[in-house]
């Protein structure tokens, strides 16, 4: 067996302290710190042993005397606090220009064209929380068969549809049309189109997270994923990673299992079969189920559950493997609003040398650089410095 690297992104699990937080209206946001405070201390003994408490003050998480992982923080260079941009930066693409957002909703021409091309009217058309807007407009959708279209502080065109009213296939087809109009015609008007199916009855609607589908933009240039693939390795994507890179540089995609626990299962399973290469996983529940829902108890619970899986992950590693645990942005469940928050992110690196303090890294691309170095893939011209001593 050759060398392998595992990168696990805890979606939205920032640690506060971004130097430019105020520019994003996010002063004081700190997902781990504020969650810990809100619940009277986190219970994450395994992450603590890796050194999570050594990188920031987190209630309940003492600094470890000799942390098992190299540990530090990363400051994002890209001008956005978004999932796609954060993952791209990890793999070597820095986005200097933010993608357009729609705080007043989408312009009329977009709405009209979407209505014309899909044959259904549009409800909503404003920034909203996905669970709130379906509660509000679901009954009207059930009556009229119109789409629920909404956005957020991110550059996203989201279409929610009750699957008892609009068949899933029709929702996907409509999102494909939106994707062509907003991304596929040369001008990038959104970062992603997202299909948001749900079912149930008023007051008790449930989102079908396993049927959510994201239609993104291909990365504008080569990434570390391409370099790793070109070096003859496998690149296994778990969860939404494949969508974020539009399949580029990915050799195997494990379609999004239902929840974070199942995604950790998928990582463990793939470690049983990958000969050499990268396993790149995104655990989205932190963000979608707890961060955006402003649910600190839920966030703390998911951290505890992930922590409980850390020993299995460590046991699955050989001396030829490294494991990196990090995040793509913040999503402080105690903060105002329901959107992402500009924060630094944690960085824990297991394997690849004696554990050390990695300090504060400029940019997320050190992850891609590290993985590329570990796997002997080409690095030149891509940003980032290897974290390996
Ligand atoms: O509120 P929900 O529908 O979960 O949407 C959230 O998920 C989107 C993409 O991950 C974010 O931009 C935010 O709008
Ligand atoms: Mn994210
Ligand atoms: Mn999100």
Image (cartoon, rainbow, N blue to C red):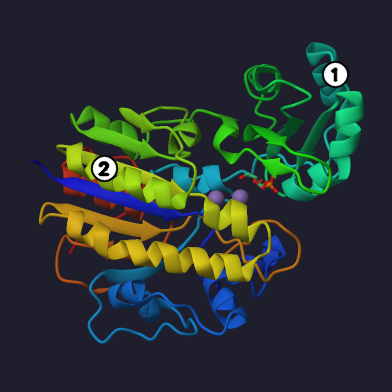
Q: Is residue 13 above or below residue 139?
A: below
Dot 1 lies on which element? loop
Q: Quadrant of residue 177?
A: top right
Q: In x, y percent, where is residue 120?
A: 85, 18
Q: Is residue 351 above or below residue 133?
A: below
Q: Quadrant of residue 317?
A: bottom left
Q: Which residue is at a point 43% across and 31% down the rendered structure image? A: 221
Out of 237 and 20, give the one closest to the viewer: 237
Name the residue beneath numbered marker 2: 269
Q: Which residue is at a point 25% across and 59% down the rendered structure image? A: 312
Q: In x, y percent, where is residue 289?
A: 60, 54
Out of 139 and 75, give the one closest to the viewer: 139
Figure quadrant of the N terminus: top left
Dot 2 lies on which element? helix
Marker disc for residue 180: none
Figure quadrant of the C terminus: bottom left
Judge left or right: residue 140 versus residue 65: right
Q: Which residue is at a point 15% across and 71% down the rendered structure image? A: 354
Marker disc for residue 120: 1
Q: Quadrant of residue 239?
A: top left
């Amino acid at each position: 067996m050759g060398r392998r690297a595992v990168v696990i992104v805890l979606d939205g699990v920032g640690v506060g302290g971004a130097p430019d937080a105020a520019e994003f209206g996010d002063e004081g946001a700190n997902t781990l710190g504020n969650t810990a405070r809100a619940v009277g201390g986190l219970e994450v003994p395994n992450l603590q042993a890796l050194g999570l408490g050594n990188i920031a003050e987190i209630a309940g998480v003492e600094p470890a005397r000799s942390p098992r992982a190299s540990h530090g923080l990363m400051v994002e260079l890209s001008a956005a606090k978004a999932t796609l941009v954060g993952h791209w930066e990890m793999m070597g693409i820095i986005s200097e220009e933010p993608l357009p957002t729609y705080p007043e909703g989408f312009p009329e021409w977009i709405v009209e064209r979407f209505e014309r091309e899909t044959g259904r009217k549009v409800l909503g058309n404003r920034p909203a929380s996905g669970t709130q807007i379906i509660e509000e407009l679901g009954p009207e959708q059930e009556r009229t068969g119109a789409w629920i279209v909404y956005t957020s502080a991110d550059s996203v065109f989201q279409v929610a549809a009750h699957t008892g009213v609009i068949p899933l296939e029709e929702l996907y087809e409509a999102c494909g049309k939106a994707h062509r109009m907003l991304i596929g015609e040369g001008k990038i008007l959104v970062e992603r189109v997202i299909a948001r199916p749900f079912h149930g009855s008023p007051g008790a609607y449930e989102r079908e997270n396993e049927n959510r589908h994201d239609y993104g933009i291909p990365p504008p240039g080569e990434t570390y994923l391409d370099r790793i693939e070109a070096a003859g390795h496998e690149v296994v994507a778990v969860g939404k990673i494949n969508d974020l890179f539009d399949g580029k540089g990915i050799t195997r995609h494990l379609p999004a299992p239902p929840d974070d626990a199942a995604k950790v299962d998928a990582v463990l399973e793939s470690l049983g079969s990958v000969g050499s290469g990268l396993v790149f996983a995104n655990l989205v529940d932190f963000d979608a189920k707890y961060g955006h829902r402003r649910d600190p108890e839920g966030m703390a619970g998911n951290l505890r559950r992930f922590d409980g899986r850390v020993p299995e992950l460590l046991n699955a590693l050989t001396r030829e493997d490294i494991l990196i645990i990090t995040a793509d942005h913040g999503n402080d469940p105690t903060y105002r609003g329901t959107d992402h928050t500009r924060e630094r992110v944690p960085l824990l690196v297991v394997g690849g040398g004696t554990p050390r303090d990695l300090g504060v890294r400029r940019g997320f691309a050190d992850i891609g650089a590290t993985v590329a170095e570990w796997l002997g893939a080409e690095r030149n011209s891509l940003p980032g410095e290897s974290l390996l001593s």
